[in-house]
Amino acid sequence: MFSTAIGAAAAATLLLSGCGDSGGESPNAGLLDGAELTAGSKEFTESIVLSQITSKALEDAGASIEDQTGISGSATVREALESDEVDFYWDYTGTGWVNILGNTTEDVPEDLFKAVSEADAKNGIAWLDPAPFENTYRIAVKKDFAEKNGLETMSEAAEFIGANKDQGKVCAASEFINRDDGLPGLEKAYGFEFTNVVELDLNLIYTQVGQKCQFGEVFSTDARIKANDMKVLEDDKDFFVQYQGAMTLRQETLDEYPEIADIMAPISKKLTDEVMMELNGRVDTEGEMPEDVAQEWLEEQNLIAS
């Protein structure tokens, strides 16, 4: 989907330029001295990486961060935010619109971020300016399976499953299976049903498509799509809602530490689809730790002291 070679070359160049400033003072030194915050995240790689990036940036500004990342399920981590168990985590506009605010996938406004942030403000939750990347749900198959059966779109997949019941298994995580903007809504929108649903941990799906199932739930910025030779099927009916990433926190926290928005703004702007796929890949396919990936990327971008 994206050029790993180009991403690696760019990272190497930035690393070299960053080394020249080694030991430099933080651009945000002292802004959050005395602040004590707890970082949360969902359980998948991208969410953890984003919270680690945020934690490292806030620590660089003087904050003390307790790590509570890796919470299972969107509803659980949202409850943790609302109940003051965590102070921030990254969420997605589609999740906000459908799962948090209770809207449907059929009445999505053109400016989704504005609609979500304004509506959630009534709940005392602030959404900082979103990053450019969008990590939406998708259904994928092995490339050779797609080529053999002429599958390019979800409409073609629905027709194929209807005629080939023995080849209609889908691997999906529990949350996707039960979300209105996940499997139930997808099947309704395309007028079909998968023959069988195999519930798996999200991290196992990428290696099990082609083994336990023909189809699988994936995230569009996940580097394992390319690593496992998968093809993402086009959502030709535009069912899936836009999932643009943004940091969320309680408004009272932002009121107490308004500097957080200023610290995070230049960081968020750099988080493109290409960057997120590269960072995710360093964790999922190269085995690096999320906190190390976050630290190195921030230093390479001269966003924190190196």
Image (cartoon, helix red, strand yellow):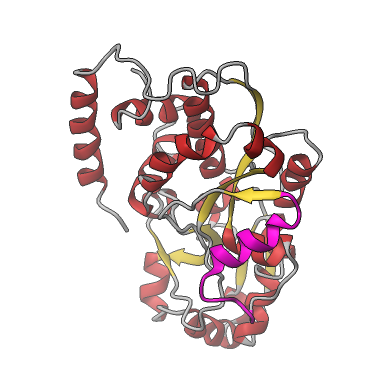
> Could you say where residue 50 lies in the image, as x and y percent from the top left?
51, 39
In percent of the image, x 33 and y 17: which residue is there? Answer: 306
- Nearest the viewer among 266 and 106 is 266
Q: Hey, which quadrant is residue 13 in on the image?
A: top left
Instruction: Give the quarter of the image for residue 240.
Output: bottom right
Whether the magenta-drawn stretch holds residue 96 is answered as no
Q: Residue furthest top?
A: 23
**Looking at the picture, does residue 28 appear above or below residue 87?**
above
Q: Which residue is drawn at 24% across and 24% down?
A: 18
Range shown magenta: 106-124
Q: Which of 43 and 300 is in front in this view?
A: 300
Q: Which residue is drawn at 46% across and 34% down?
A: 263
Residue 25's place in the image compared with 168, above or below, is above
**Can residue 110 be found in the magenta stretch?**
yes
| Label tally | 0
Residue 258's quadrant in the figure? top right
Residue 294: x and y in percent read 44, 30
Q: Can residue 194 be seen in this view?
A: no
| Residue 296 versus residue 98 in the image, above or below | above
Q: On the rendered structure, is 81 left or right of 146?
A: right
In the rendered image, residue 277, in percent from the top left (x then y), is placed at: 39, 48
**Where is residue 230 shown, x and y percent of the image?**
41, 60
Q: Residue at x 38, y 47 (%)?
A: 269
- In the displayed structure, 219 sits above or below 166; it is above
Quarter containing the N terminus = bottom left
Residue 53 visible in rendering: yes
